[in-house]
Amino acid sequence: MYRFLIFYLTLGLLVIGVDSRSAVAASYRSPLVDVQWLQVFSAYRCELRQPLGIQGNAGFERQAEAADTFFLRLARGEPLTGSFSVHALPPAWRNTSEGVWLGDLYLDRQSRGKGDVVAQMRKALEQHQRIWLQPSVAMQGVVPVSITLEPMHFKAAVAGWNTCVAELQPGYEQLQRTTIFFPEADAALAPGELRKLNNIAGWLRQDRSITAVYIDGHTDNIGNTADNLQLSRKRAQWVAGYLAEQGVDKQRLLIRWHGEQYPVVANFDATSRDRNRRVTVRLERRVSSP
């Protein structure tokens, strides 16, 4: 009862235009006459962003092999962190306060949030509903606060988003630790494994902050130990050679081999041995000085 009373009272403040200068509420939203959904796309990241006047911007981000992320970037002050109650509201022209609670969303120290509720937020915007976020509990220094995303132009922007998502390539977060699985004997790598190496090579060609690429060869336990050690060396050298052929600087490639010494699972059967016949590739990024 009291929760819904607070909901409608705060919504009323938003409708009459309370902004971040008010002593009553901090409201982060875009003026209706200036609503935009900006598309910020690259091969590694898709972003839909709504400017919140001069206060910052908020929206959605997607990287390869990852779920949608909601983000809030404020122009001034500390990032908002904590649990937010998320509601879908009718568009402003409906002149009604009816709303649907979508769930709670936790924003981390970078004011970013993930989870099923993010997908629901996107769906509601596509259905021409506003998204309203309010802290689930009081937050020191910003009590109360609200964030409103307007649906105008969102559906049109989603078409470009979907194209970007379909063409996403893995970035550093996905590639920094990659395992290349090898078949038995000297059979060729599967196309999916070659694709992993091509993705790594593509990233390394454009990211000069990667100072070292550790390439570690491993085998299963079939055969004798000495032969397996040499086989793991051969596989690691093959991966390094392939990356060099794709334009990666050889000086960044550090090769090591371990034979059967470090299985990821016990070599009980063919399935477990498949997992142990591998080369791991680890990217090490230069850390900037403080």
Image: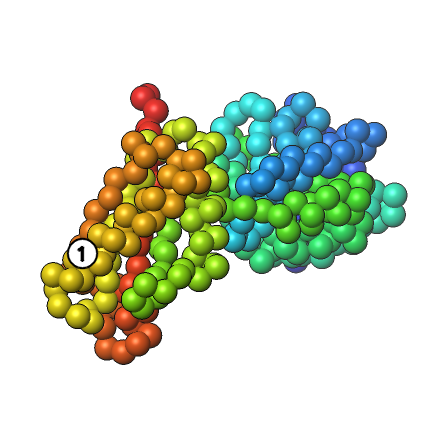
Report which quarter residue 265 is drawn in: bottom left
Q: Quadrant of the N terminus?
A: bottom right
Across and down, in percent, residue 91 comes to 82, 46
Q: Nearer the viewer, residue 55 or 138?
A: 55
Rendering coords of residue 81 (x, y %): 49, 39
The image position of residue 153, as x and y in percent, is: 80, 41
Kind of residue at disc 1? Gln
Farthest residue to the bottom: give it: 269
Badge 1 local density, few (<14 within 10 Å), some, or many (20+)?
some
Position above or below: 132 against 1: above
Residue at label 1?
230
Q: Is residue 70 left or right of residue 172?
A: right
At 34% from the left and 41% from the top, the residue drawn is 283
Q: In the rendered image, which quarter contains the C terminus?
A: top left
Residue 183, horizontal then vertical, whole percent: 35, 66
Count of picture labels: 1
Front in this rendered view, residue 60 or 237? 237
Q: Is residue 138 above or below residue 217?
A: above
**Residue 109 found in image quarter:** top left
Q: Is residue 203 left or right of residue 150?
A: left
Residue 154 appearing in the image: no
Query: Residue sitting at 73 percent across and 44 percent down?
Result: 160
- Residue drawn at x 34%, y 24% is 288
Image quadrant in which you'd find residue 102: bottom right
Q: Residue furthest top?
A: 290
**SS under mark 1:** helix
